[in-house]
Image (cartoon, rainbow, N blue to C red):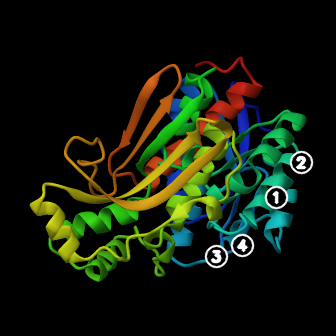
């Protein structure tokens, strides 16, 4: 006999990318399982997990997520949980049988690949596509959004900027008819932490080593320190919030390598702080033109950016009708990024099945 179906919608998920964020999402799904069944009244079944270094697994009846987590952390291959062998990520997407693909692979600042093709494949197959990857948003936002509309599914990406903070949800649902004229903020947690540690007396190299030791900075920190991560986020925000396509190469970019302990001390003596500031401003004479930059700036106590320390982030959005809106996130973690993905999943299925309770 076939098992009795549950008395609530049960949606199948495939996770492509099982690093810190993918694991945090798996843990969050386990933690929230009972709550989600109660309200909004749905369940998720993880039918596929693909990692970059520990194999891939698909089980149409659902994977034992807790056991998969334990195996991954013990260094075992996920292949042992799979109902059949999978050779690559394209085959994983094709055969997973999921209603939604969650894509959380490493970002490619130059092209957005291969994540871009993974999302194209998922959307073309009629799957919701949720990503934490900034690259595809920058290089193919309109294409992927249009493809999702044609297929009657959703393409969401809340966790690409400011982790799980609802930046794009606010813009999508909270600013209808508003023209975003400018935004500024601190969007790279790693460099903000490095500058904070330098204020506490460390050299930049010492601060980078600390950031690496707690898993905030990569082994090669250049993507953060040289401003590439921040530039990609600026490009994504301009592309979506201002509806002006922009690539990272079009963002004026200066990282923090040139910030010395003496500069930090001089700023302190003048009651100022160095921050890596992201800014974009619509050109008043050409609303489809924009000036965008990532650069170290001295900020004073009168600025909202002054007290944003450690791994915290801030975004200030100015529009023609609402004035300035500030969003602050304090010390985010992979769990907060995972929540952004979960929120996107819930919104995707709500959009498709409005009978879900919210």
CA gap between label 1 and label 4 equals 15 Å
Mark 3 element type:
loop
Q: Which residue is mark 1?
A: 93
**Looking at the rendered structure, which numbered label has been put on residue 155?**
none
Using residue 137 as the reference point, say whether residue 282 is left or right of it. left
Residues marked 1 and 4 touching at CB (< 8 Å) = no
Q: Which numbered disc, 3 or 4, marks the residue closer to the eye? A: 3
Q: Which residue is mark 4?
A: 79
Please determine whether, in this image, residue 270 is positioned above or below residue 86: above
Q: Which residue is mark 3?
A: 54
Answer yes or no: is residue 19 visible: yes
Using residue 287 as the reference point, say whether residue 352 is left or right of it. right
Q: Which numbered disc, 3 or 2, marks the residue closer to the eye? A: 2
CA gap between label 3 and label 4 equals 8 Å
CA gap between label 2 and label 1 equals 11 Å
Using residue 228 as the reference point, say whether residue 271 is left or right of it. left
CA gap between label 3 and label 2 equals 27 Å
Question: Is residue 90 or residue 192 the one in the foreground?
Answer: 192
Q: Residue furthest left?
A: 269
Give percent across and percent down for residue 51. 65, 69
Quarter of the figure with residue 358: top right
Tell me which label, 1 or 3, sits earlier in the chain. 3
Question: Is residue 34 or residue 139 the one in the foreground?
Answer: 139
């Amino acid at each position: 006999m076939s098992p009795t179906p549950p008395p609530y919608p049960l949606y199948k998920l495939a996770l492509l990318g099982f690093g810190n964020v993918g694991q945090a999402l798996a843990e969050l799904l386990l933690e929230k399982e009972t709550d989600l069944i109660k309200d909004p009244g749905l369940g998720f079944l993880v039918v596929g997990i693909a990692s970059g270094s520990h194999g891939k697994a698909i089980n149409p009846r659902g994977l034992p997520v807790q056991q998969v987590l334990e195996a991954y952390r013990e260094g075992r291959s996920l292949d042992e949980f799979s109902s059949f062998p999978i050779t690559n990520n394209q085959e994983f997407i094709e055969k997973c049988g999921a209603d939604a693909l969650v894509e959380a692979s490493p970002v490619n600042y130059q092209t957005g690949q291969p994540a871009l093709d993974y999302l194209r494949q998922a959307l073309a197959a009629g799957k919701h596509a949720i990503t934490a990857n900034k690259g595809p948003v920058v290089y193919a936002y309109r294409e992927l959004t249009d493809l999702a509309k044609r297929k009657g599914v959703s393409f969401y990406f809340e966790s690409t900027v400011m982790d799980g903070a609802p930046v794009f949800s606010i813009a999508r649902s909270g600013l209808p008819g508003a023209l975003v004229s400018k935004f500024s903020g601190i969007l790279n947690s790693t460099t903000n932490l490095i500058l904070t540690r330098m204020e506490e007396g460390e050299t930049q190299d010492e601060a980078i080593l600390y950031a690496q030791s707690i898993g905030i900075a990569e082994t090669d920190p250049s993507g953060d320190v040289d401003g590439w991560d921040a530039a990609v986020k600026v490009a994504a925000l301009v592309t979506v919030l201002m509806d002006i396509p922009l690539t990272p190469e079009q963002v004026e970019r200066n990282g923090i390598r040139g910030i010395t302990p003496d500069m930090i001390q001089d700023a302190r003596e003048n009651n100022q702080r160095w921050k890596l500031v992201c800014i974009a401003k619509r050109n008043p004479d050409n609303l489809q033109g924009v000036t965008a930059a990532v650069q170290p700036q001295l900020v004073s106590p009168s600025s909202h950016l002054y007290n944003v320390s450690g791994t915290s982030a801030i975004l200030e959005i100015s529009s023609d009708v609402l004035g300035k809106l500030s969003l602050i996130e304090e010390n985010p973690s992979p769990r907060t990024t995972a929540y952004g993905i979960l929120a996107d999943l819930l919104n995707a299925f709500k959009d498709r099945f409005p009978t879900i309770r919210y």
